[in-house]
Amino acid sequence: MTGRTKERRGAGGYLLIQGTPGETERDAAPADPTALRRRDLRTARTGLVVRPPVAPLAVATAPAVAAAPRPGIKRTAVNMAVITVATGLIATMALPGTALLSDPAANAENAITAGNAEALAQLKSTESQSVAIDGQLAATAALRDDFSATTMEELVAARAAEERQARIAEAAAAAAAAPRASGPSVSDFLANPPYPTVSPDQIIQVAMQYQGVPYLFGGTTPAGFDCSGFVQYVYAQFGIALPRTVPQQDAAGTRISKADALPGDLVIMPGHNGIYAGNGMIIDAPRAGKTVSLRPIWTDNYWIVRVGI
């Protein structure tokens, strides 16, 4: 090299020599001739900086997986047996459903319930629901059960009947325990009446003598009266023989209008009677727990019967 040239080493290991102006650069011999490549020569001539070669990236490779050993003949046979059994179980469970779908008679109830027209038509076509009936059997019409609900009116009437029976039983027990009157009886009065002349006012006076006598079912003496027994006992003292019960005493006289009623006439009601006292009043033996008394007529459902006057 002369003193006018300068050496510098370029990329890739080659040598660049810079001379005087006007001179061109020339390549210097590379330090390592084995490393010289065509691309490096081209770079040296053009004066471009060539990047050093990049080392290739190392690629990690996965280790090879050892091949799995093939299953033995015994294990394969066991697997095939399990698959066969499972398939058989599934087929067995599917059989009942298939039978129901293919048998219209077995599926009749479901078809009728669901209203399936096609299924019903199939049942009719196959006569799955046909039943042979003996011609000697008589056809019987279907009837509803003979049951009905009890109305409130029936319950009230039944309770009233029970209460009435209880009062009758109580009155009968009281009559059996009541002391017998020592005075004359109805038959005694009829044989020898103390008032041979019948007078309406006199009838009321005799009836008023027995105020306070307790009601007694079946009673016909001053020891205790029921309604018709009281009327019979009063009229017997005038020699008038009346029957024992209310309906019989009603039929024994003559019905008259309420406007023509006089004291001493009979006041008849459904199941009860007494003696008319005038001015809309009645004297009677009311019911169990009460006594013979004078009181207003409390109802319009009554009529007047005249006897012996």
Image (spheres, rainbow, N blue to C red):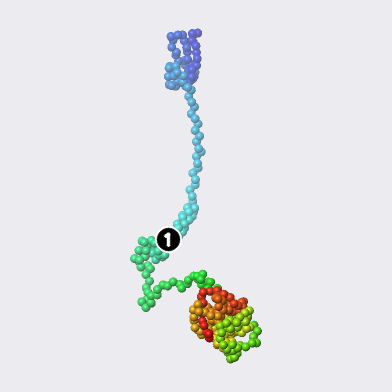
User: Is the residue 72 above or below the residue 156 in the image?
Assistant: above
> As drawn, is 164 to the left or to the right of 110?
right
Question: What residue is rendered at 40% in x and 75% in y?
Answer: 140
41 or 123, nearer to the observer: 123
Tell me where residue 225 sits by quadrant.
bottom right
Question: What residue is rendered at 37% in x and 67% in y?
Answer: 128
Q: Position of residue 288 (x, y in %)?
A: 60, 77
User: Is the residue 249 above or below the residue 71 in the image?
Assistant: below
Q: Position of residue 118 (x, y in %)?
A: 36, 61
Residue furthest left in the image: 125
Question: What residue is rendered at 61% in x and 77% in y?
Answer: 290
Question: What residue is rendered at 46% in x and 8% in y?
Answer: 20
210 or 269, nearer to the observer: 210
User: Is the residue 199 above or below the residue 63 in the image?
Assistant: below
**Element assignment for label 1:** helix
- For disc 1, the neighbor class at 10 Å (few under 14, some 14 to 19, many from 20) is few
User: Is the residue 36 above or below the residue 304 in the image?
Assistant: above
Q: Position of residue 102 (x, y in %)?
A: 38, 62
Q: Position of residue 292 (x, y in %)?
A: 61, 79
Could one spot residue 17 in this view of the protein? yes
Could one spot residue 229 in this view of the protein? no
Tell me where residue 190 sits by quadrant.
bottom right
Q: Which residue is mark 1?
A: 97
Q: Amino acid at mark 1?
A: Gly
So how many labels did they put on this image? 1
157 or 294, nearer to the observer: 294
> As drawn, is 123 to the left or to the right of 84?
left
